[in-house]
Image: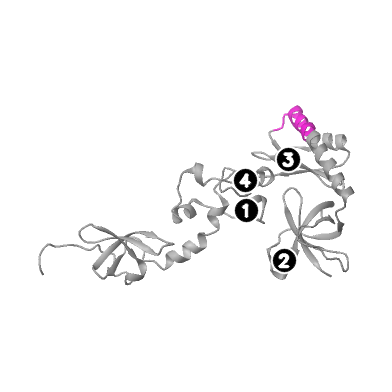
Amino acid sequence: MAKYIVRYGSMRLLGAFDCPEEAVFARGTKVIARTGRGLEAGEILCEATEEAFEQLREAGGRILREMTADDARDISRLCEHQHEQFATCQQCIQKLGLAMELVDLEHLFGGERIIVYYLAEGRVDFRELVRMLAGEFQTRIEMRQIGVRDEAKLMADYGDCGNPVCCNTHLIEMPPVSMKMAKLQKATLDPTKISGRCGRLKCCLRYEYDVYEQLQKDLPPIGSTVTTSTGPMRVLAHEILAGRLLVEDGERVRHLIDAADVRRPTDDAPPESTGKDE
């Protein structure tokens, strides 16, 4: 039985889904599927492969059918009601005085549940809120505390690069990003320029880090002394992608040279000019 990778839900989850016998779906086909959460609308990305299975974190389910015009109209009505449901939920939170920030609501296509996404500094006792919402909407309520990166995944649109934000398109999980990665790539350290829509370091700083790290291993360490055609020089800095070195000779004159033109580091002592013959 064929399996397809399907993207579904507000958090753009991915799963490998069984499909009806002899059914064939093209990329981008809208489908109705049974997931672990209930009946949901999804989008076909590709046929499942072993490599795709290894990358998936979420459980799959079963594709029931291709989305019909009636299904599309039902989804549109759900989206219209979600604005009212969001306002109702916000009023309940304020009434109970809960220390939480409502981010989004997701009403599953099959009506099995409404998922409430929220931000909070710590744990929140939302039992009374759940009872109020369940009585108001007559369905199961699921509370989901998220972080600021997940908030961007739900709400953000475009990044500084002009493309849709990565967390809302192709990223399966948020990669760890550190200031060390920005420093190695010689990126500006201005927080306003290396921070994404979530306010954290941009995920794209992680993409090329492994390449930079590998290339840096082939360069002599900063502070070491290398032998060049004109004599020993001290390494001051790297231009990693260009494969060049900023070096300083014994007269404190700086030069930019190709790393391929130097020999292995000799020692850690700086080159010295004595000013007289030995």
Residue 57 x %, y %: 71, 59
* Residue 94 within the segment the image draws in magenta: yes
Please name the residue that numbered disc 3 is placed on.
Answer: 104
Please name the residue that numbered disc 2 is placed on.
Answer: 53
Range shown magenta = 86-98
Residue ID at (14%, 62%): 274
In 3D space, how far apart are the residues under numbered discs 3 and 2 (Cα atoms)?
29 Å
Residue 229 x %, y %: 26, 71
Quadrant in the rendering for residue 92? top right
Q: Which mark is residue 158?
A: 4
Residue 195 x %, y %: 54, 45
**Which secondary structure lies at badge 4?**
loop
Dot 4 crowding, Cα within 10 Å, few <14, some 14–19, many 20+ = few
> Is the magenta region chiefly helix, strand or loop?
helix
Please name the residue that numbered disc 1 is placed on.
Answer: 174
**Which secondary structure lies at badge 2?**
helix
Specify the amino acid type for callout 4. Answer: Tyr
Residue 153 x %, y %: 67, 47
Q: Which of marks 2 and 4 precedes in the sequence?
A: 2
- Left or right of 250, for residue 236: right
Q: Nearer the viewer, residue 146 or 196?
A: 196
Residue 37 shows in this picture: no
Q: Nearer the viewer, residue 32 or 174?
A: 32
Q: Are marks 3 and 2 in contact (CB under 8 Å)?
A: no
The answer to whether residue 197 is above or below residue 12 is: above
